[in-house]
Amino acid sequence: MKVFGLIGHPLGHSKSPKLHKIIASYFSRQLVYKLFDMDHIDKVKPLIEGLKNGTYHGFNVTIPYKEAVLPFLDIITPKAQKIGAVNTIYFKDNQVIGDNTDYDGFLYLIKQQSIIKKIMNPIILGSGGAAKSSYAVLKDLGFDSVVVSRNPKDNVHFNHIISYDKLPSYSYDLVVNTTPIGMHPNINQSPLDESLVHDKFVIDLIYNPLETTLMKYAKHSIGGLDMLIVQAFKAQNIWFGEEKELKDDILNHIKEDVYE
């Protein structure tokens, strides 16, 4: 049986093992999915070796290692290169390859929202791997997003990055939260005060809880569960070398199963 896993820290909140088993069951796949909670990226080395020798068959990567893992890879796909972050790793033709299915997940999330047609000025909270994926999607859809970061600095992946204290002087109508602020167990936290989002549309990539404090503050909001499912499904397609289709009815069943 093929063995996969999630690399990140902390992972106590993760529903990925359950999610991947559910997705696999709908597509007649057999797998084991583990959590690799590591406090330093160097600990990924034995996992990469395990990928090469067949102990493992693929990994997902989450906060805070979507960028830090890049030096450990032999090949980065063009999509992941453009984004500057990896969330899916696999071994093919004696090469360790990094790809990005967060892009696919966020694109799905955006396209499901009719309100996006009214959006003019999106901002993205955070500047890590998930922010880069979201930024790339919005850019491909024609948006020039402003990135808001605690540590704003020149970044080749972003055209415009500012600090949080500068945000009140900007005009925006969509807030995309790619930070972990508000994630379980710190569910009462929010990256922004209510006054900054009460009349905005919010997309929060957090999926646990299903509705974050930031989402409660907003005029309209959607969480990250659909994105989580789609990126996991796309990763499985890569790992198993298949091009299965995720239909809406199956996605809805998966959502129900994850929170049973």
Image (cartoon, helix red, strand yellow):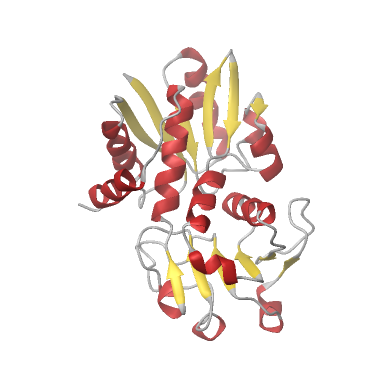
Asked if residue 189 can be seen in this view, the reply is no
Q: Is residue 155 above or below residue 151?
A: above
Task: Identify the image quadrant of residue 213.
Answer: bottom left
Q: Residue at x 32, y 26 (%)?
A: 31
Can you name the residue that lies furthest to the left here? 260
Q: Is residue 71 above or below residue 38?
A: above
Could you tell me which quadrant the N terminus lies in?
Answer: top left
Residue 95, image x and y in percent?
61, 18
Left of 46 or right of it: where is 131?
right
Q: Is residue 106 above or below residue 48?
A: below
Residue 187, image x and y in percent?
37, 69
Residue 18, image x and y in percent?
29, 41
Residue 66, image x and y in percent?
58, 43
Asked if residue 7 can be seen in this view, the reply is yes
Left of 135 or right of it: where is 108?
left
73 or 44, which is in the foreground? 73
Task: Identify the image quadrant of residue 42.
Answer: top right
Q: How many marks?
A: 0
